[in-house]
Image (spheres, rainbow, N blue to C red):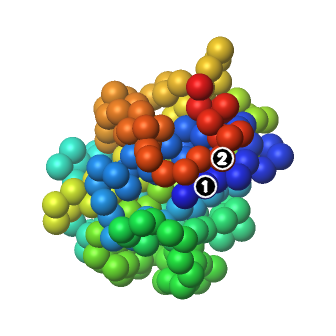
Amino acid sequence: MKIVPAENDAPAFTAQVEALLEGIARVRRPAVLVLIKIDNWFGPNWLRFSTGAHVPVAGCKAGILPIPLFVPNRVASQRRFAAPQYNEVSGGGPLHTEDIEDARERRMSDLPERTAIVWYSGNSRVNRRGSVMAYMAVGNLYRPWYAGWTEGQAWHIEHSKGIDKDEVSNLTRIGFGSTREVEPTCVELRR
């Protein structure tokens, strides 16, 4: 699940997102993992727009949890990876559509069972901050969460919602420890 940073993306943040994906794949083992890059930073309010005022700790039923209403022109890319090897696959169509009525009605239950979605922000080199929002299957529920990173001496998780910062860090550490082949330039970024 290699992520190639664009010109305005911070390679160190992109490496964090890549490791987080690997950690989610290894720990949560979704049937399908959808990775969506949003063109710019997005805040934790996107989680509230989807889940309401409170982010349920236990999770939400798939038929209740809506797909966030990112407009398609904000979507820089969408990729799908299928278990068990998490190779990239085609198909499925875009999750974010121009048809606003259709978009408002879309729920996680419209996707294949045990699909995980991870949204991450582009333009992180310029903004010096990055964001990730995820919907992960936990049992028969979906757990939505958000985490925000900032660049200081190193990229670090500044805040989280719906998940503990330590859990995000643990998933990222697990991903960095993945046995998948890694290109040498990526190894240098991860040290």
Report the label total: 2
Q: Of the numbered discs in the image, which one, if any, rests on residue 183?
A: 2
Q: Answer above or below: position of 98 versus 24.
A: below
Q: Disc 1 vs disc 2: Cβ atoms closer than 8 Å? A: yes
The residue located at (38%, 69%) in the rendering is 83
Helix, strand or loop under label 2: loop
Q: Is residue 175 visible?
A: yes
Q: Of the numbered discs in the image, which one, if any, rests on residue 103?
A: none
The residue located at (21%, 44%) in the rendering is 57
Q: Answer above or below: position of 157 versus 21.
A: above
Residue 9 position within the rendered picture, expressed as x and y whole percent measured from the top left: 74, 43
In the picture provided, is 69 more to the left or to the right than 105? right
Q: Which residue is mark 1?
A: 2
Q: Is residue 60 visible?
A: no
Disc 2 marks a residue whose amino acid type is Glu
Residue 38 position within the rendered picture, expressed as x and y whole percent measured from the top left: 64, 56
In the picture provided, is 176 more to the left or to the right than 138? right
Residue 32 position within the rendered picture, expressed as x and y whole percent measured from the top left: 40, 70
In the picture provided, is 144 more to the left or to the right than 44? left
* Displayed quadrant of residue 39: bottom right
Q: Answer above or below: position of 174 versus 89.
A: above
Q: Residues within 10 Å of mark 1 (few under 14, many from 20)?
A: some
Residue 149 position within the rendered picture, expressed as x and y whole percent measured from the top left: 55, 31
Check the picture and name the quadrant holding the C terminus: top right
The residue located at (36%, 68%) in the rendering is 84
* Displayed quadrant of residue 105: bottom left
Helix, strand or loop under label 1: loop
In the picture provided, is 62 more to the left or to the right than 95? left
Residue sitting nearer the eye, 12 or 120: 12
Disc 1 marks a residue whose amino acid type is Lys
Check the picture and name the quadrant holding the N terminus: bottom right
Residue sitting nearer the eye, 42 or 167: 167
